[in-house]
Image (spheres, grey):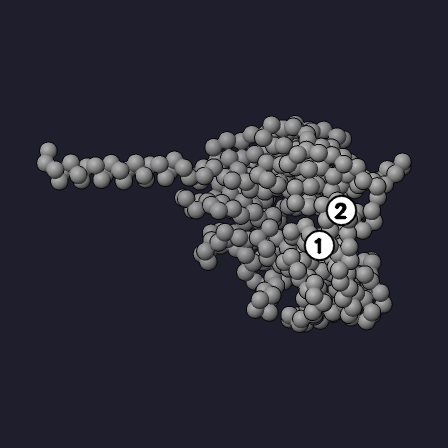
């Protein structure tokens, strides 16, 4: 064998090694969900299930945690995964999904996650206390009730994304309503730093049973998005500046006060009278057509639950579905037969960018997606 042939084979071998190594290192992406135990009719047992996907295929299905519904439950919504393997439920229980161990259990209300500290509001007949659990040190604290803290993440009070500020709608008769900004430290002590007075309000029809309030959401760590009146959206920053963003024409009073939402990808939505508006604050525009899901995925909502999904602008299919969750290489949606009540889904579907196909996975009742982890 001559020198040039040997050199070619060496280069080919190196290239083959890097290609093979690259394929071997393609990530395993895990989808977590909760469900009722299959052989029960009253959901006495709840399960947290992990589905491991690799190169577009479901490689492993594992029951990561099991609990009696009367003990720790996950069917009230609000489940979230932090630090890749820690599951928090709405009541403030903390579960390590790597070993199925309960790190902290409290039948209260998950108030906020401030840095590594989970804050739980616990009310009972003997008192009204706050509890904290540090995800890094596992240290536990009990703190006497603080009204300025325990209402966080509820209708009139929200914490900033970085956990350092609290914004509260102060209320008051139009046009004297105001927003207060508070700084919050590691000891959960708050200090008011700014009050912004203005004509902020929300309204609804005579059929509405909502309490008087003004909806708002954090845009970033120093700005809120709220409204002067239904559809008239403005931002307020911690310096007290109010800026016009856009106006959506609302034909008649809705049957509930409008609200804002922010998804895991940073998209901000305005919900009014059954319509979902995607708000682009930078360009001062809104859209009701194509809604981004992150990682190149998006969807278009129809008049029913028949939803069309897209990847990088190309249609990848339509399903009778809700609850879409995207990650780098996959899109998961809860599905049911066309026209069926999606409160009782048949399972879920997963599309992947490797073979560009949908995989259907049927599951028992009480099923809901939680999050992707990779």
Image height of 118 relative to 105, above or below? below
Q: Give the x, y percent position of residue 328.
A: 48, 47
| Image-based side of 63 in relation to 153, left or right | left
| Image-based side of 181 in relation to 296, left or right | right
Asked if the residue at tag 1 contacts the one at tag 2, i.e. Cβ–Cβ closer than 8 Å, the answer is: no
The N terminus, quarter of image: top left
Q: Give the x, y percent position of residue 346.
A: 60, 40
Q: Give the x, y percent position of residue 242.
A: 70, 70
- Give me the residue at 32% from left, 39% from top: 18
Callout 2 secondary element: loop
Q: Is residue 113 in view?
A: yes
**Which of the pair 309/127 is nearer the observer?**
127
Q: Is residue 347 in view?
A: no
**Which of the pair 302/48 is nearer the observer?**
48
The span from disc 2 to disc 1 (Cα, nearest Å) is 11 Å
- Give me the residue at 41% from left, 44% from top: 354
Image height of 111 relative to 277, above or below? above
Give the class, few, some or many, for how many residues have Cα within 10 Å of label 1's Cα (few <14, many ≥20): many
- Give me the residue at 56% from left, 62% from top: 289
| Label 2 or label 1, whichever comes before in sequence order | 1
- Give me the residue at 56% from left, 47% from top: 325
Q: Which residue is the site of mark 1?
A: 165
Task: Give residue 108's quadrant in the image.
Answer: top right
Callout 1 secondary element: strand
**Which of the pair 147/289 is nearer the observer?**
147
Q: Which residue is the site of mark 2?
A: 188
Residue 234: give its label: none
**Which of the pair 115/198 is nearer the observer?**
115
Q: Give the x, y percent position of residue 330.
A: 49, 45
Residue at the limit of the structure toward the right, as seen here:
126
């Amino acid at each position: 064998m001559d020198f040039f042939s040997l050199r070619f084979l060496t280069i080919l071998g190196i290239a083959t090694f890097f290609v093979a190594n690259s394929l071997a290192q393609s990530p395993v992406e895990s989808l977590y969900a909760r469900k009722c135990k299959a052989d029960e009719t009253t959901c006495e047992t709840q399960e947290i299930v992990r589905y491991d996907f690799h190169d577009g295929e479901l490689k492993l299905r594992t029951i990561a945690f099991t609990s009696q519904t009367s003990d720790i439950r996950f069917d009230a919504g609000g489940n979230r995964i932090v630090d890749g393997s820690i599951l928090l439920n709405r009541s403030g229980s903390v579960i390590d999904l790597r070993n199925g161990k309960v790190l902290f259990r409290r039948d209260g209300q998950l108030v906020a996650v401030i840095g590594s500290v989970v804050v739980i509001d616990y009310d009972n007949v003997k008192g009204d206390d706050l509890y904290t659990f540090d995800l890094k040190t596992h240290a536990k604290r009990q703190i006497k009730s603080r009204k300025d803290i325990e209402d966080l993440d509820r209708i009139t009070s929200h914490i900033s994304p970085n956990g350092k500020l609290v914004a509260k709608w102060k209320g008051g008769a139009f046009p004297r309503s105001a927003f207060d900004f508070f700084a919050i430290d590691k000891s959960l002590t708050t200090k008011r730093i700014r009050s912004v007075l203005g004509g902020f309000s929300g309204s609804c029809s005579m059929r509405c049973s909502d309490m008087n309030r003004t909806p708002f959401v954090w845009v970033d760590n120093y700005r809120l998005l709220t409204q002067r009146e239904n559809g008239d959206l403005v931002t307020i920053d911690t310096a007290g500046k109010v800026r016009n963003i856009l106006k959506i024409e609302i034909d008649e009073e809705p049957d509930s006060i409008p609200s804002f939402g922010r998804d895991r990808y940073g998209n901000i939505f305005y919900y009014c009278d059954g319509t979902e508006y995607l708000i682009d604050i930078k360009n001062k525009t809104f859209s009701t057509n194509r809604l981004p899901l992150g990682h190149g995925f998006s969807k278009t909502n129809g008049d029913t639950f028949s939803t069309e999904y897209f990847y990088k602008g190309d249609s990848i299919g339509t399903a009778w579905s809700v609850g879409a969750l995207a990650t780098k290489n996959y899109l998961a949606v809860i599905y049911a037969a066309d026209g069926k009540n999606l409160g009782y889904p048949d399972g879920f579907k997963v599309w992947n960018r490797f073979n560009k196909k949908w995989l259907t996975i049927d599951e028992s009742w009480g099923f809901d997606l939680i999050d992707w982890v990779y």
